[in-house]
C-alpha cells in the first residue's frame, strides 16, 4: 500500500523521488489519498505563514499566495499545463487533426494564457477567503476531491493516441473494477457529509457543477479522439476551484 501511494505521489508531484515506476497503473487507485497528502502539505505551510503574520491585516493573502505557489511547485505545474493546452485547443475552434496538433503544441497561446490567469486568480481569491476564516479542513480536502476527477473522467472513454496518462487511467479502470465505484462514492458522499456537519447547503452546488464539468470534458474527449493528460490536468484544477468556491463560508 505504501509503495503504491509513494508511486502516486511521485506520479502527481515532485516528491518523493521514485524513479522505479515499473507499473504506474497500480498508482491510480491512490491518486485520491495522494491528494490528501498534498492538501496536508499545502495547508500546513499556509497555517505556519498565517500564524506568523497574523498581526498583519493581509495575513490571509500572504498565506494564500504561498499555498498556490507550493501547489504549482510541488506538482511541477503539470495540471496547469494541461489546462492551458486544452484551452488553446478549444479556443481555436478546430476539430480533428488540427485540434490534436494544437493540444500537443507546447507553446502557450492566448486562450491558454487567459484560462491560466482566470483560474489562478480564482484559486488565489477563494483560498485567501478560506484562510481568512481559518477553514483549513477545506484546503486539505480540495486537492483530494480534485484528484478523483481523472478516474471519473476516463470512465467509458479510450485513451488518445500517444497519451501516457490517459492510457494509464483507462487501463487502471479496466484492471480494478471497484475503482470507479470507490471514487464515485467519495465524490458523492463528501459534499453530503460537509452539509450534515455544518448545514452549509451551498456545498451541494458541487453536484451539478462537477457533473457539468465532467460532461463537457468527456464530450470533447469523445469527439476528439479520446482522453489525454491534458484533459486530466484541466479536470483536476477546475474541479479544485469548484470545490473551493462551493465551500466558501463553510
Image: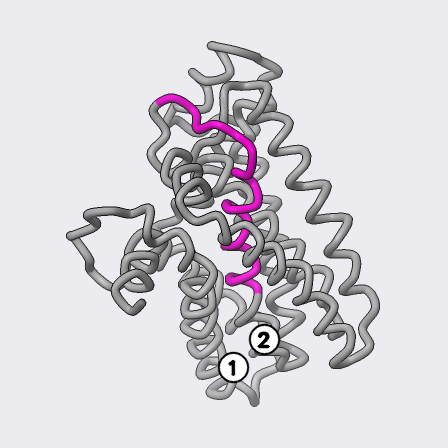
- The residue sitting at the top extreme is 97
Identify the residue under disc 2: 60
The quadrant holding residue 115 is top right
Give the percent coordinates (x, y) of residue 207: 75, 54
Q: Are marks 2 and 1 in contact (CB under 8 Å)?
A: yes
Residue 116 against residue 158 in the figure, above or below: below
Out of 40 and 6, give the one closest to the viewer. 6
Task: Please identify the quarter of the rendering in which residue 155 is found.
Answer: top right
Q: Position of residue 2 (x, y in %)?
A: 29, 69
**Relative to 94, 107 lies left or right:** left
Tell me what residue is drawn at x 49 percent, y 41 percent: 232
Q: How is the image coloured?
A: one colour
Q: Is residue 131 magenta?
A: no
Nearer-the-camera pick, 202 or 218: 218
Q: Residue at x 38, y 21 (%)?
A: 161
Secondary structure beneath label 1: helix
- Residues packed near mark 2 inside 10 Å, few (<14), some (14 to 19) or many (20 plus): many
| Label 2 or label 1, whichever comes before in sequence order | 1
Give the image location of residue 196, x and y in percent.
Answer: 77, 77
Q: CA distance from mark 2 to mark 1?
A: 6 Å
Q: Extreme left residue here?
A: 20
Location of residue 202 in the rendering, given as x and y in whole percent from the top left corner: 81, 64
* Mark 2, secondary structure of its residue: helix
Look at the image and tell me in which quarter the C terminus lies.
bottom right
Task: Decide if residue 131 is on the left or right side of residue 171.
Answer: right
In the image: residue 2, left or right of residue 156: left
Count every numbered label the image shows and give the total. 2
Give the residue pinned by disc 1.
50
- Who's the residue at 53% across and 49% down the image? 236
Quarter of the view holding residue 78: top left
| Magenta residues, start to end | 142-161
Amino acid at each position: 500500500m505504501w509503495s503504491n501511494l509513494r508511486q502516486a505521489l511521485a506520479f502527481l508531484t515532485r516528491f518523493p523521488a521514485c524513479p522505479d515506476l515499473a507499473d504506474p497503473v497500480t498508482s491510480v487507485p491512490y491518486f485520491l489519498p495522494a491528494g490528501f497528502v498534498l492538501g496536508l502539505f499545502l495547508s500546513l505551510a499556509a497555517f505556519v505563514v498565517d500564524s506568523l503574520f497574523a498581526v498583519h491585516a493581509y495575513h490571509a493573502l500572504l498565506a494564500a499566495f504561498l499555498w498556490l505557489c507550493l501547489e504549482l511547485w510541488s506538482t511541477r505545474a503539470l495540471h496547469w499545463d494541461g489546462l492551458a493546452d486544452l484551452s488553446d485547443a478549444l479556443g481555436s475552434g478546430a476539430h480533428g487533426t488540427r485540434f490534436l496538433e494544437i493540444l500537443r503544441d507546447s507553446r502557450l497561446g492566448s486562450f491558454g494564457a487567459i484560462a491560466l490567469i482566470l483560474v489562478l486568480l480564482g484559486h488565489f481569491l477563494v483560498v485567501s477567503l478560506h484562510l481568512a476564516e481559518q477553514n483549513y479542513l477545506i484546503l486539505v480536502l480540495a486537492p483530494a476531491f480534485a484528484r478523483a476527477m481523472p478516474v471519473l473522467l476516463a470512465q467509458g472513454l479510450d485513451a488518445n493516441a500517444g497519451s501516457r496518462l490517459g492510457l494509464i487511467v483507462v487501463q487502471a479502470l479496466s484492471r480494478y473494477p471497484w475503482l470507479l465505484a470507490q471514487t464515485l462514492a467519495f465524490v458523492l458522499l463528501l459534499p453530503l457529509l460537509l452539509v450534515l456537519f455544518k448545514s452549509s447547503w451551498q456545498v451541494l452546488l458541487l453536484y451539478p457543477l462537477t457533473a457539468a464539468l465532467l460532461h463537457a470534458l468527456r464530450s470533447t474527449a469523445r469527439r476528439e479522439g479520446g482522453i489525454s493528460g491534458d484533459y486530466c490536468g484541466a479536470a483536476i484544477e477546475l474541479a479544485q476551484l469548484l470545490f473551493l468556491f462551493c465551500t466558501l463560508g463553510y
